[in-house]
Amino acid sequence: MKHSKKPVRTANPSECWAIVRVSSREQEQEGYSLDVQEQEIKRLAARDGNEIQRTIRIVESASDARSRELYGTAVEEVRAAAVAGRLKALYFHRVDRATRNFSDLADLEKLQKSYAVRVRFVTPDLDTAHPAGELLLGVLACVAKAETGTRVEHVKASQLKRVESGLFVGRAPYGYVNVREGARGRVRTDERAADNVRLIFTLFATGTFTVRSLMRELSDREIWYTTKSKCFGKNKLHKILRDRSYVGDVFYNDQWYPGSQERIVDTTLFNRVQSLLGSRTYLKHQTTFGHQLVECAHCGLKIVGEPRSRTLADGSTKVYTYYRCTAVGELGHPRIRMTEDALDHQVRELFRCIRASDDDVQEWFRSTLRVLAQDAGQREQRERGQLASQLSQVESRLDNLLSMRLDGEIDASQYREQQAKLRGDKASLIARIESLGQQSAEDSDLIIETFELSQRLLDRWDTADFASRREILMMIASNWRLEGETLVPELRMPFQALAEGLATLEAGNGRGERIRTSDLCNPIAAR
């Protein structure tokens, strides 16, 4: 086994180094700058009859975790010089510039005992070459460690106070911007970035995008992250979609606290996105009838789309999509492949079946749906009353919680935990009440629009893009099956009632004999 070659030690170490170090800009402003330390170290070295050959300057920041690595790198350089036998003495201004924990103290002792490096300090005038100096260094190192621990506790307490005031600790997330107002840092909404965040949530909430396809969609729309870093990466998008800061919360120490920043996304939209993220099945291709939409009637597995390209005579390329069951290659399974044009033709025929050409039939459906809209409005009024009662109970519990904290019945940690939960419940109830209010005002028109939509589906299908076509298919049917080469939908109400009623009328059995008006309200209730 080969042994690594040891560094060559010089007979008489002659180099003297200095390390000057500040931990914040405030120390520089208070007269404890790197230059001040360096000048006083040089004066001490001159009294010792030495000259400083190299000075290592370190500026640290409490908000930057990488700052500690700077001092570690400096210690490694000093150790390498000591091992090589070049280092005679190492100078610091104060003990807390050299050691802030026992690990740092051990490094200094090793330099002194293993490599005979003299360690000197300006304040106090301390020389570790003497036993008294070693003893004093150990005492002062313990003091420096205690002071560092105290500063850490003060920083944590200051951060917690800031969080309890609803403010971010450190840099605000995308969509907000840190600004300086006098001596205080504030957070303001970055309108351009906030618009991007709203668009990201809105697009993803449609259910037609994965994080990766959303990334491409934003690029196609020329929606950029920043002017310097244009692309929304997958990790950036996922972080944005999971960030509760956009609904008014602040994250600190593995917990969410109520924040004071402006909400960029409403709670209902945010919860919808979280639901989709939790049960996301990712698309590989944008296929209208693929992606878990249609199941095979033979085995129950899902139909998948396979894009295929072919070069035409003029040199252009045309893409075709074929649909098949995922188990089509298994023994005994029908080997059926359907083109998208064939499935598209069947969907168009379905739209024609639920299209009423008779004006009297259309008017009868409209009047019936108006009555159902009124019933739905009454149900929502009752639900709104129940939610208002629950909201009142939550507000009462918040008041009681504050009283318990003031009376000392619970500690600060319990108060923050329960307060955060109750505020979350309150925000959710308010969002549901607001949603009901908007829904109640729009239901009557929406129900009529549902019927009118059924009469215009064929026209809309012709002009719809991939996402819109999938929305139409999922809207009119709860399930789609491929039986042989036939696409069979399980129509939602009122589309099923409409199709059956129109079929009855065409058979001459009288108006609406098989149409149950109670069925027509199902899509409204489900929505």
Image (cartoon, helix red, strand yellow):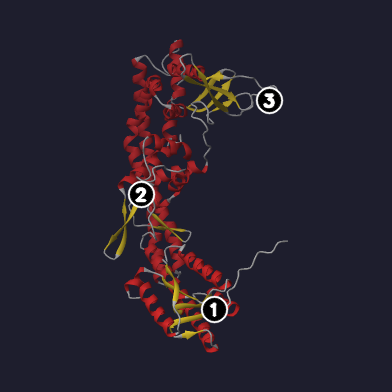
Of label 2 and label 1, which has the lower sequence position? 1
Of label 3 and label 2, which has the lower sequence position? 2
Q: Residue furthest left?
A: 182
The image position of residue 27, as x and y in percent, is 36, 73
Q: Residues within 10 Å of mark 1 (few under 14, many from 20)?
A: many
Look at the image and tell me whether residue 27 can be seen.
yes
Of label 3 and label 1, which has the lower sequence position? 1
**Residue name at image x 43 percent, y 81 percent:** 45
Residue located beneath label 3 in the image: 330
- Quarter of the picture containing the N terminus is bottom right
Q: Is residue 5 above or below residue 217?
A: below
Residue located beneath label 2 in the image: 175
What kind of residue is marked 3? Glu
Q: Nearer the viewer, residue 355 or 367?
A: 355
Q: Pointer 3 and pointer 2: residues touching (CB < 8 Å)?
A: no
The residues tagged by marks 2 and 1 sit, at their Cα atoms, a distance apart of: 53 Å
The image position of residue 372, as x and y in percent, is 38, 30
Q: Residues within 10 Å of mark 3 (few under 14, many from 20)?
A: few
**Residue name at image x 34 percent, y 52 percent:** 176
What kind of residue is marked 1? Val
